[in-house]
């Protein structure tokens, strides 16, 4: 009973943290739906695609590929490139699981790795509690899926100022995750500032600036993390 | 249209799900290698930082409101605001900034 109570408590904590994610998802998936409609998807197809993929950049690239009526191989490659960062995130989370965690919980948490859910997951201390992720997924996944369907069916109904304001919700959450640990750790603070500056510079430089935001994220993440790991290896246990 | 949309959706989904679950299910133990551990320690922070900047500056109707949201969210997060508070404050700052500027 104790354990059950704890599970539901953690589940509800996940739902609470999932609410801002879900709000942001509604807006983003809504705009994604407009692209899906141009690619010829029905609202049901869009909802299914979003439910399985849960990936803004990946789906965006995928829908454009569908629209172009490209070979099937192309959608496989473009999906790998746009979503490869989830492979890294999955590696990171594998280190946060208690080794005894069952296969089902690994599959369950793995299925729900998005930028945002990953962000709030690593923001918590200690081993991963799958019920936290399930709570966040319970609100965020339907929002993402339904938002896509609504976008396909209804196009642009939200007023512009609302889309504009809601557009920063996800970024606000990212900052809420990375700033507190940076405040308490000088090395992490420097790594994050370098990341900000490098990312801003890369977006305006030739060649790397022409890459999609998703590819740039991969290149910068790999380069900066390798440099940081080489220059400032972490001694203590990875939390 | 030569291709079936359902096949496209199936392929996208299959690739994405495999990318997400393979490392989690295959890597069971603790990674001991110090370099890889350090690398995995930094990856999440770097990814989130890289996705936030410059993305947040272009997420709104004006760069100014995006920058204002970035500063407000950073300060609030520095003083320990929760995810929801920081996200809501960022949205509010955009709304107010644009109400004044636009």
Image (spheres, rainbow, N blue to C red):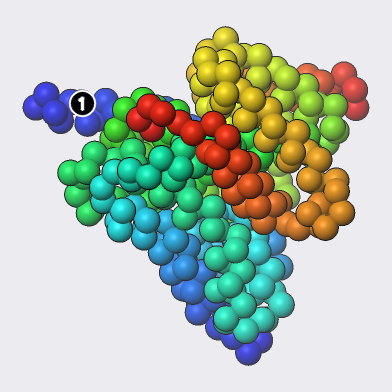
Residue at image mark 1: A6
Q: Can you say whether A139 is above or below A151 in the image?
A: above
Residue at horizontal 19 percent and vertical 49 percent from the top: A102
x then y, percent, for residue A109: 34, 47
Q: Can you say whether A206 is above or below B58 in the image?
A: below
In this view, the residue farthest toward the left is: A1
Q: Quadrant of residue A173?
A: top right
In this view, the residue farthest toward the top is: B79
Q: Nearer the viewer, residue A44 or A61?
A: A61
x then y, percent, for residue A238: 38, 32
x then y, percent, for residue A71: 62, 84
Q: Nearer the viewer, residue A213 or A41?
A: A213
- Disc 1, SS: helix
Residue at horizontal 69 percent and vertical 61 percent from the top: A35
| Left or right placement of residue A193 versus residue B80 in this view | right
| Left or right placement of residue A36 versus residue A160 in this view | left
Chain at tag 1: A
Residue A42 visible to an observer of this rendering: yes
x then y, percent, for residue A230: 55, 39
Q: Quadrant of residue B33?
A: top left
Residue at horizontal 84 percent and vertical 32 percent from the top: B63
Residue A131 visible to an observer of this rendering: no
In this view, the residue farthest toward the right is: B102
| Left or right placement of residue B62 versus residue B79 in this view | right
Residue at horizontal 54 percent and vertical 31 percent from the top: A232
């Amino acid at each position: 009973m104790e354990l059950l109570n704890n599970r539901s408590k953690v589940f509800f904590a996940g739902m609470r943290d999932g609410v801002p994610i879900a709000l942001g998802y509604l807006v983003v998936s809504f705009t994604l739906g407009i692209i899906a409609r141009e690619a010829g998807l029905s609202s049901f197809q869009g909802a299914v695609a979003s439910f399985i993929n849960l990936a803004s950049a990946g789906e965006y690239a995928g829908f454009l590929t569908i629209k172009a009526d490209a070979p099937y191989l192309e959608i496989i490659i473009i999906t790998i490139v746009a979503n490869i960062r989830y492979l890294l995130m999955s590696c990171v989370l594998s280190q946060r699981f208690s080794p005894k965690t069952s296969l089902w919980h690994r599959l369950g948490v793995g299925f729900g790795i998005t930028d945002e859910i990953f962000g709030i997951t690593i923001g918590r201390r200690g081993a991963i509690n799958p019920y936290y992720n399930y709570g966040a997924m319970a609100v965020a996944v339907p929002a993402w899926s339904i938002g896509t369907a609504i976008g396909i069916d209804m196009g642009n109904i939200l007023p512009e100022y609302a889309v504009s304001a809601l557009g920063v919700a996800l970024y606000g959450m990212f900052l809420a995750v990375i700033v507190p640990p940076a405040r308490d750790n000088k090395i992490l603070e420097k790594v994050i500032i370098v990341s900000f500056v490098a990312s801003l510079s890369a977006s305006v430089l030739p060649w790397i600036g022409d890459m999609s935001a998703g590819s740039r994220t991969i290149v910068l993440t790999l380069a900066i993390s390798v440099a940081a790991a080489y220059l400032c290896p972490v001694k203590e246990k990875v939390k | 249209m030569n291709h079936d949309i359902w096949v496209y959706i199936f392929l996208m989904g299959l690739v994405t799900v495999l990318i997400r679950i393979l490392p989690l299910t295959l890597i069971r133990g603790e990674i001991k290698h110090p370099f890889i551990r350090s690398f995995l320690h930094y990856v999440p922070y770097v990814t989130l930082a890289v996705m936030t900047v410059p993305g947040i500056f272009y997420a709104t109707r004006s760069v100014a409101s995006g920058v204002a949201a970035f500063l407000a969210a950073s300060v609030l997060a520095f003083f320990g605001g929760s995810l929801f508070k920081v996200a809501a404050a960022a949205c509010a700052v955009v709304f107010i900034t644009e109400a004044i500027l636009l």
